[in-house]
Amino acid sequence: MIDHEKSEHIGLYGVGSSASIIIQIAQHFSKKVYTFSRSEKGKEFARKLGATWAGGSYEMPPVELDAAIIFAPAGGLIPAALKAVRKVNCSLWRHSHERHPFLPYKLLGATLYKIS
């Protein structure tokens, strides 16, 4: 779902096996990857894999992101990711993050699609 030709700065929320694969693919396409983890171990793992930046789950990255993928099962990361990503005209998330009462929908500024 990420347009790899237009997306230079990609954010990954949650650093596990899926993110480790995405980091390697992004590097192949010369993209910069910014990872977000709640643990120091996760940040260190991301750096070893070649992430451009590794920060805490709710930190703002040093640049505005072109795209973000949330792997962590934490609905509270949705607002953090929306703040970090430049505004686009489409936003997607899986059913596990559906209709959280704390989600500030005004951050979307976009058409919302649910995927399952």
Image (cartoon, rainbow, N blue to C red):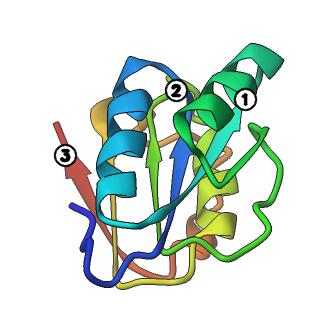
Q: Residues within 10 Å of mark 3 (few under 14, many from 20)?
A: few
The residue located at (52%, 45%) in the rendering is 12
Mark 3 or mark 2, whichever is nearer to me: 2
Q: CA distance from mark 2 to mark 1?
A: 14 Å
Q: Is residue 54 visible?
A: yes
Local SS, label 2:
loop
Is residue 76 something one can see in this rendering? no
**Disc nearer the start of the sequence (2/1):** 1
SS of the residue at dot 1?
helix
Label 1 near label 2: C-beta < 8 Å? Answer: no
To which quarter of the image does residue 20 belong? top left
Please tell me the numbered disc located at residue 115: 3
Q: Nearer the viewer, mark 2 or mark 1?
A: 1
User: Which of the 4 quarters of the picture holds residue 111?
Assistant: bottom left
Q: Measuring 19% from the left and 46% from the top, which residue is drawn there? A: 115
Q: Is 12 or 86 nearer to us in this picture?
A: 12
Residue 72 image label: 2
Q: Quadrant of the N terminus?
A: bottom left
Quarter holding the C terminus is: top left
x and y percentages locating residue 35 in the rendered image: 62, 44
* Residue to which mark 1 is pinned: 43
**Residue 10, relative to residue 58: is it above or below?**
below
Identity, as a three-letter code, of the amino acid under mark 3: Ile
Q: Any mark on residue 55, and which?
A: none
Q: Amino acid at mark 2?
A: Ala
Would residue 112 be found to the left or right of residue 108 on screen?
A: left
The front one of 104 and 38 is 38
Secondary structure of the residue carrying numbered label 3: strand
Q: Report x, y in % for residue 49.
A: 53, 33
- Using residue 92 as the reference point, say whether residue 78 is left or right of it: right
